[in-house]
Amino acid sequence: MTAQTSRAPSLAPSPLLRETIGSIAVLTLDSPKTRNALSEAMIAALHGAIDSVRDDKSVRAVVIAAEGPAYSSGHDLKELTARRSDADKGRAYFSQMMKSCSDMMQAIVRLPKPVVAAVQGVATAAGCQLVATCDLAVASEQATFGTPGIDIGLFCSTPMVALSRNVPRKHAMHMLLTGEHVSAQRAYELGLVNSVVPAGAERDAAIDLAKKIALKSAYTLKVGKEAFYRQAEMNLADAYTYAAQVMAENMMARDAQEGIGAFIEKRDPKWEDR
């Protein structure tokens, strides 16, 4: 199917492109001059795009890619610094921006559809946070990852939330305390990305992965993704109690009945997404 590219009409060019490739929505950070910084406009555009695909039944999975040499350099420090001239020296704006970014990241987690990052270059600070927030990530062998806020006197506290939920604790602390970047291969070894591919192949690889997942029942994907993140925050006993309830309810779904029947009858299932 031919890819369709669109931009939402606005007074200024959107920093985000959206393409539809079959049942996959590809969202591309498109501000290479700012190294795809998560500016106020970029955060709003990305959050809006995530919200727009939530109830779009034609979209079954999402890929978040980027243009230019950087996937994302994190928050736009020039934009933030400009508000130090405010009466409160920027405190209210800084709080607003951190909340807006955190809300956008949580919207990705809450989206009832899988989200795959396609990382072609450097992903630092909130850019690294974005990769860690996505459900899956495919990285170019040239990609690097880091949380270098410590080098400028600004600990990467919000990126830490997603990073520490992806990477073993001591390795996360090493990245946060030293600001050192890790290679794509090292990110794979740490569990930050799912696979490393030759440079230039990451976007297609991420789309192929999203297409593979999109063949599954949308209802089951929704149930599974929500359950995965909820149980991860529970103690073992509560997690098993919750997961057992989810699985029992899932067994009552039409797609579970169809999928099990198809398996027994050795045929392909016909999903109804319910």
Image (tube, rainbow, N blue to C red):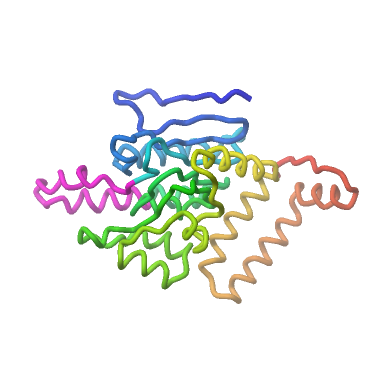
Q: Indicate whether 238 appears above or below 25.
A: below
Indicate the quadrant where residue 46 lies. Answer: top left
Q: Residue at x 52, y 37 (%)?
A: 53
Residue 91 lies left or right of residue 259; in this view the side is left
The verdict on residue 145 being magenta is no
Q: Residue at x 12, y 49 (%)?
A: 84
Residue 249, percent from left and from top: 70, 58
Residue 20 lies left or right of residue 174; in this view the side is right
Residue 87, percent from left and from top: 9, 48
Q: Residue at x 79, y 40 (%)?
A: 270
Residue stretch rendered in magenta on the structure: 73-102
The verdict on residue 86 being magenta is yes
Residue 268, percent from left and from top: 82, 42
Q: Residue at x 58, y 36 (%)?
A: 24
Q: Quadrant of the N terminus?
A: top right
Residue closest to the eye, 193 or 251: 193
Magenta-drawn stretch, dominant element (helix, strand or loop) = helix
Residue 121 lies left or right of residue 25; in this view the side is left
